[in-house]
Structures are given as structure tokens and as C-alpha cells.
Image (cartoon, grey):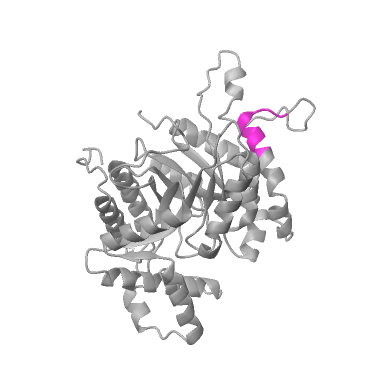
């Protein structure tokens, strides 16, 4: 099974100035089902692999009807069965929601399913509202999850490496699949271990990733005003490690291309804006249709949100999207652009990735028979 030899870095192909990847929120549009959304995810993952995108991540969210990605590990296992080469990962798993041992076992299992292809991206936010986070964690002390993130990360890393020191309460506990299998009689262990990425939308994770010498993924798609400060902090503070000799940062970018003059892209983005407004005002639902968004009467505060949000979505024709992505790459110096297409229709999302691949001249081999 051919995989890229470097689990972090990818090679830009075609005329792309930097590797392109996919962030999938598994969005569910009004009138559609989670089953349809997950089938679209398979279609996009196959397309991304065929066209030379570097990696494909899914993100953990909870209690959001329009986002069917509450279980990243389950989705990634499904995608692994339908792909052969593309890197798969979490963008991310919200570490405070889970026991570190559980994550180590889940991603050790994924690594055994797709050797050398799995990334473990971690975040410290709950990926939901406070009440849902409390239900997930079985505690009302949510601040402890965020404040304890560095300790949870250290524990998870030790489970992945199976290297708790003698005398530690967990020294006799092992994440399986994992390195312990190599030390058992007759044991042979796969050499791969999922690389850890830290995700963030502010300076906290940037600083921690730099201190630990880990790759960093920044959520430009919903925290654009913090992108350059966070990347600067990461690069200036970076300490070389056994994982990386120099900093490596990707940014998540909302991008949507359509076949027409950009009218449909603007309609889809407006619908995504309405969905975000409802989410932020405590009314989460399915992604509305463009027709519903066109008939919706936005108040002045909502219109200002639409203006601000839309300004950070790279959308329009394929050429316009390429120009916007190139400009963003120049401004941020990101080592990788991870594109997320927010639209009501799965077909629109799938077509957007195809158009962007075409705009950059990414390879376009014939689909395999099995696909």
C-alpha cells in the first residue's frame, strides 16, 4: 500500500503553491439525511485521493443537527475502507471530552487498519455547548478540561508510546493495538504511530505546539483575525523535536467553487451564514437551502455578521477561488491549506473540490474500477 514517506509534510502537485487537503464537517442539509451526508464524505475522500489532495480530516462536533461528525474514529474507519493512499485524520478529536486511553486505543486501531496513513489532531474546546460538554464528560467542571489539556496530552502521548515510567500508576496499562505487542512473546509491531497535531483558534495551542515541537493546525475558517498572530507565535516559539526539526503549520480555509459565474457559490455561502447565525444564537439546525436563505429577512446585526463571515470565505468561480487561496498562502505562509466546503448540497461540495483541483492542474487519473 503506497503512502507518502513523510507523515507530516506533503508535496504540492500541479501548480498549487503548497499541499492542498480537505476538512470535512459531514454537513447535513435540510431535506437530507446523515446517511446521505456520510455517503458524500466517501465520494469526496475518493475524489481527494484520486486528485492528489494530501490528507482528509473530519472534526468532532456534538448536538448539532447539521453536522454528522460526532464520532471521528468511526467515520475514519469507514473512510479507510474506501481509500488506499490519502492520509486520514481528526481535525480534531476534542481531548477533554475523552479519556486519553480511549483515544490511544481508537487511533491505534485506525493505524492498524490503515498503516502509515493516520493523523491524530487534538483540540481543547468541547466542540459543542456547555450542557452537552457536561453530558459528554459527566461533570459540570468544564474549565478543568481546558486547563488540564497539557497534562491530558502528555498522558495520551505516553499511552501511544507505551512509555510510562516504572512506578507510575499506569505503567502496567497498555493501549492496544500499540507498542506493547512488540514486547510480548513472539510479538511484531507495526512501526507506525499516528503523529499528533495540535489544533487551535488562538495563541494557546500555538504556544503549546511550538514548545513540544509538534505540527500546528489553525482554524482560519472561523477565527481569521487570529491567524497571522497565532502562526507568528508558533514559528517564533518553535522548539525542534524528534517529530519536527522546523515548524509546520496548516490552516483550515472555507472555500467553495461553482461552475457558473459565482452566483451559486454566493447563494450557498449565504445559506451557510444563516446556519452559523442560528448556531451562534442557540438554534442549531440542518443547513438551510439557498432558497430559504434568500427569503430570510436578516436584521442589521445579522447582515453585519454575513458581511464579516463571507469576507473570510474564498468563493466564486474556480479561478477566483484559486486567486483567493494563492493570496491567503502568500499572506500567511501556511505550509498547507486544508479546504472545507460548506454548502447545503453534497453534490455542490463534491463539485467544488473537483473544480479547485482542475484550477490547480492536479492530476486527474481515471477512477479505479473499485471506486
- Give the residue at x 57% y 47%: 235
Q: Position of residue 130 (x, y in %)?
A: 65, 64
Quadrant location of the C terminus? top left
Q: Nearer the viewer, residue 107 or 252?
A: 252
Q: Is residue 6 magenta?
A: no
Vertical comparison of 317 with 354: above or below? below
Vertical comparison of 58 with 317: above or below? above
Q: Is residue 143 left or right of residue 267?
A: right
Q: Nearer the viewer, residue 251 or 170?
A: 251
Q: Position of residue 81 (x, y in %)?
A: 37, 38
Q: Could you say which quadrant of the image residue 330 lies in?
A: bottom left
Residue pushed farthest right? Answer: 167
Residue 26 visible: no
Quadrant location of the N terminus? top left
Q: Position of residue 172 (x, y in %)?
A: 72, 27
- Give the residue at x 64% y 33%: 159
Q: Is residue 157 magenta?
A: yes
Query: Which contiguous range is marked in magenta?
Result: 155-164
Residue 158 visible: yes
Q: Nearer the viewer, residue 76 or 125?
A: 125
Amino acid at each position: 500500500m503506497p503512502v507518502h514517506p513523510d507523515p507530516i509534510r506533503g508535496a504540492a502537485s500541479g501548480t498549487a503553491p503548497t499541499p492542498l487537503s480537505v476538512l470535512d464537517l459531514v454537513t447535513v442539509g435540510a431535506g437530507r439525511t446523515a446517511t446521505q451526508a456520510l455517503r458524500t464524505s466517501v465520494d469526496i475522500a475518493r475524489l481527494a485521493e484520486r486528485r492528489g489532495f494530501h490528507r482528509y480530516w473530519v472534526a468532532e462536533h456534538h448536538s448539532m443537527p447539521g453536522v454528522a461528525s460526532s464520532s471521528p474514529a468511526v467515520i475514519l474507519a469507514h473512510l479507510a475502507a474506501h481509500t488506499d493512499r490519502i492520509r486520514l485524520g481528526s481535525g480534531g478529536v476534542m481531548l477533554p471530552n475523552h479519556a486519553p486511553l480511549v483515544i490511544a486505543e481508537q487511533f491505534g486501531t485506525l493505524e492498524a487498519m490503515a498503516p502509515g496513513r493516520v493523523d491524530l489532531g487534538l483540540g481543547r474546546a468541547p466542540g459543542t455547548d456547555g450542557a452537552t460538554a457536561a453530558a459528554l464528560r459527566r461533570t459540570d467542571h468544564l474549565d478543568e478540561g481546558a486547563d488540564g489539556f497539557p497534562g491530558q496530552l502528555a498522558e495520551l502521548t505516553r499511552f501511544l508510546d507505551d512509555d510510562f515510567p516504572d512506578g507510575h500508576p499506569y505503567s502496567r496499562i497498555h493501549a492496544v493495538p500499540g507498542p506493547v505487542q512488540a514486547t510480548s512473546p513472539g510479538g511484531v509491531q507495526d512501526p507506525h504511530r499516528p503523529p499528533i497535531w495540535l489544533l487551535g483558534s488562538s495563541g494557546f495551542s500555538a504556544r503549546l505546539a511550538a514548545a513540544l515541537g509538534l505540527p500546528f493546525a489553525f482554524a482560519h475558517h472561523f477565527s481569521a483575525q487570529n491567524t497571522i498572530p497565532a502562526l507568528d507565535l508558533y514559528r517564533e516559539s518553535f522548539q525542534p523535536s524528534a517529530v519536527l526539526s522546523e515548524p509546520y503549520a496548516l490552516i483550515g480555509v472555507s472555500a467553495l467553487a461553482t461552475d457558473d459565474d459565482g452566483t451559486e457559490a454566493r447563494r450557498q455561502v449565504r445559506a451557510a451564514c444563516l446556519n452559523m447565525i442560528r448556531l451562534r444564537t442557540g438554534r442549531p439546525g440542518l443547513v438551510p437551502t439557498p432558497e430559504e436563505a434568500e427569503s430570510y429577512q436578516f436584521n442589521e446585526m445579522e447582515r453585519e455578521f454575513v458581511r464579516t463571515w463571507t469576507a473570510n470565505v474564498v468563493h466564486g468561480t474556480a479561478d477566483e477561488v484559486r486567486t483567493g487561496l494563492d493570496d491567503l498562502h502568500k499572506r500567511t505562509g501556511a505550509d498547507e491549506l486544508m479546504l472545507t466546503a460548506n454548502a447545503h448540497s453534497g453534490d455542490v461540495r463534491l463539485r467544488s473540490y473537483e473544480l479547485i483541483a482542475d484550477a490547480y492542474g492536479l492530476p486527474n487519473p481515471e477512477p479505479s474500477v473499485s471506486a
